[in-house]
Image (cartoon, helix red, strand yellow):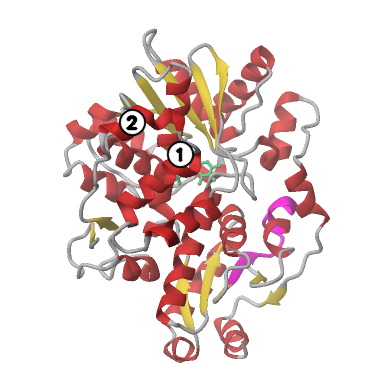
Amino acid sequence: MKYYSTNKKAPWATLEEAVVKGLAADKGLYMPEVIKPLPSSFFEEIEKMSFQEIACRVADAFFGEDVPAETLKQIVYDTLSFDAPVVQVKDNVYALELFHGPTLAFKDVGGRFMARLLGYFIRKEGKNQVNVLVATSGDTGSAVANGFLGVEGIHVYVLYPKGKVSEIQEKQFTTLGQNITAIEVDGTFDDCQALVKNAFMDKELNEHMQLTSANSINVARFLPQAFYYFYAYAQMKKIGKADNLVICVPSGNFGNITAGLFGKRMGLPVKRFIAANNRNDIFYQYLKTGEYRPRPSVSTIANAMDVGDPSNFARILDLYEGSHDAIASEISGETYTDEQIRDTVQQVYEETGYLLDPHGACGYKALAQELKNDEYGVFLETAHPAKFLQTVEGIIGHEVKIPEKLQAFMRGEKQSVPMSKEFSAFKNYLLKQ
Ligand SMILES: *Cc1c(COP(=O)(O)O)cnc(C)c1O
């Protein structure tokens, strides 16, 4: 399969090039040349298949031309070593729980899949060690570090701002050891990002070691997110509730929902999608006005969605050939303030006993608001509420049980390399590795 850039000014790439590069040379996002539809026989028996079996069929449509079937199957099974159950919350509204992976958030799937696919290309080419640099303000670092943990031939350096991530977040990437090194930068998240960018541009450093990024726009992180949507449909079909299915996605960079739109192109019978925003409602405004106006993000309690210029918007535009009408006919939008998010978490908890996290709360509310009587709805619960402990406990007024997986991180011992924000210091450190 060939991949083209959404900016159409870069050469076409192979899957391997697209995965190693991440972003195209013209700063566009890579798109597969074709999105292959899956046969109707697949959808007829999908409810009898496991998450892994479904994902293998979807992965084959994307990557089957470039990765041998046995290898791809292995990558899928290694990635999906946990479930993503659909749970009824209220009436026709169901949650697809994407928080049963190692870091209790949906980004685990993309992180794990990318690590294994990159690992395969490294072995195949007999490449020397590849070094992944990732700057994080909290959550991306944990998903990437845990995804790449133990993958041979890859070393990951996670750069994070000292004193500016929560203890739970910090523990998720500083306690791992093995091929993961946490670098604690005496500066801000922007300083961390600047160090990473400078490293990619430094000639001497790039001659010394092979560097790459595990950015969320990478096709190997982005495409596997389509697995969820097929599995959600399968579970709803199994209970006889897949007619007029509406899927609602709490969205920030819009990678997750775009993977769902790819699923629909492949024949997945989803009637329509809803993109739920927090106050960073750039996409909502685009739907209303037809104009895309990025603006600086504002902080909210659903902070993984605090994005002022969603990178995957370029992929949505490309998918619908720039037509606002076509986009608005398949996707609607909603936007919520922190106060509305808090009220939703509290109300749903009191009425049903189901505890939403702040991101899932946006998804629930948008779905509950828009769903018609003859429709069934699934929203993506993108993270476990215990990841936002203080916020959630503050809302419901009592303690939240911390899952064992999270407690295990808390018990681990933090190990980090202290670093100044000067590039020369970071460069010298890397040159010695
Ligand atoms: C990353 C993230 C989102 C937003 O996903 P996008 O693909 O960026 O739209 C939503 N919720 C949580 C918990 C996340 O970590």
Q: Residue 228, which numbered label? A: 1
Q: Range of the magenta residues?
A: 156-170
Q: Amino acid at mark 1?
A: Tyr
Say which of 377 and 398 sits in front.
377
Say which of 173 and 226 sits in front.
226
Q: Nearer the viewer, mark 2 or mark 1?
A: 2
Q: SS class of the residue under badge 2?
A: helix
Report x, y in % for residue 14.
27, 68
Q: Amino acid at mark 2?
A: Phe
* Quadrant in which residue 227 is drawn: top left
Asked whether 423 falls inside the magenta stretch, the response is no
Residue that carries the numbered disc 2 in the rendered image: 43
Along the horizontal axis of the image, is 415 left or right of 79? Answer: right
Q: Quadrant of the C terminus?
A: bottom right
Report x, y in % for residue 359.
55, 35
Q: SS class of the residue under badge 1?
A: helix
Report x, y in % for residue 242.
39, 20
10 Å crowding of disc 1: few (<14), some (14-19), many (20+): many
Above/below status of 51 relative to 432 = above
Give the mark nearest the N terminus, 2 or 1.
Answer: 2
Mark 2 to mark 1 CA distance (whole Å): 15 Å
